């Protein structure tokens, strides 16, 4: 199956804009393929305003987010692989979604020298749910 992240991103973008808010994209700038102005990267991340009034030709494709935006008054082409998107949220109220880190090609745990991690051992007994706030 194709990853759900780009579909969720498109839906959240539309929802944020329809509610009159400003969509922000939080990006892990250390992921291979991220093309953003490096002088605006802080602690390995960059926040991008992707509102219709701030960007030109926004495209949230299944593998890549790309658009043209202005940084310091200079038009700049931005390219962000979908797996580098940490979250999308509304500036005004913080509502949106943070995504889990992906593993695999260009993801944070993509180290060819390490054996694949098959996850934790399956717990014994009854399944349980944990409340996360």
Image (cartoon, rainbow, N blue to C red):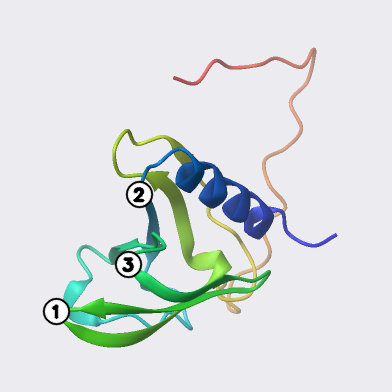
Between 4 and 76, the residue placed more toward the observer is: 76
Classify 96 as above or below 109: above
Q: Is residue 129 left or right of residue 49?
A: right
Q: Which residue is mark 2?
A: 22
Classify 66 as above or below 7: below
Dividing the image into 4 quarters, which one contains the C terminus?
A: top left
Q: Which residue is mark 1?
A: 72
Query: SS class of the residue under badge 2?
Result: loop
Q: Earlier in the sequence, mark 1 or mark 3?
A: 3
Q: Name the residue rendered at 63%, 75% in the picture.
A: 105
Query: SS class of the residue under badge 3?
Result: loop
Q: Earlier in the sequence, mark 1 or mark 2?
A: 2
Question: Going by the picture, which residue comes out furthest to the right?
Answer: 1
Classify 80 as above or below 100: below
Q: CA distance from mark 1 to mark 3?
A: 12 Å
Pointers 2 and 3 in contact (C-beta within 8 Å): yes
Q: Name the residue rendered at 14%, 79% in the picture.
A: 72
Label for residue 8?
none
Label for residue 54?
3
Q: Is residue 119 left or right of residue 90?
A: right
Dividing the image into 4 quarters, which one contains the N terminus?
A: bottom right
Between 84 and 58, the residue placed more toward the observer is: 58
Between 80 and 67, the residue placed more toward the observer is: 67
Q: CA distance from mark 2 to mark 3?
A: 9 Å
Specify few, some or many for label 2: CA neighbours under 10 Å numbering under 14, 14-19, or 20 or more: many
């Amino acid at each position: 199956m194709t990853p759900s992240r780009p579909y969720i991103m498109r839906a959240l973008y539309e929802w944020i804009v329809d509610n009159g808010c400003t969509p922000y994209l939080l990006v892990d700038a250390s992921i291979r393929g991220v093309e953003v102005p490096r002088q605006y990267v802080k602690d390995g991340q960059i926040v991008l305003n992707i509102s219709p009034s701030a960007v030109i030709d926004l495209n949230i494709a299944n593998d890549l987010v790309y658009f043209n935006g202005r940084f310091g008054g200079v038009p700049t082409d931005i390219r962000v692989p979908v797996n580098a998107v940490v979250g999308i949220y509304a500036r005004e109220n913080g509502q949106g979604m943070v995504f889990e880190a992906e593993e695999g090609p260009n993801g944070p745990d993509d180290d060819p020298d390490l054996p694949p991690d098959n996850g934790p051992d399956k717990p014994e007994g009854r399944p349980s749910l944990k409340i996360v706030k």
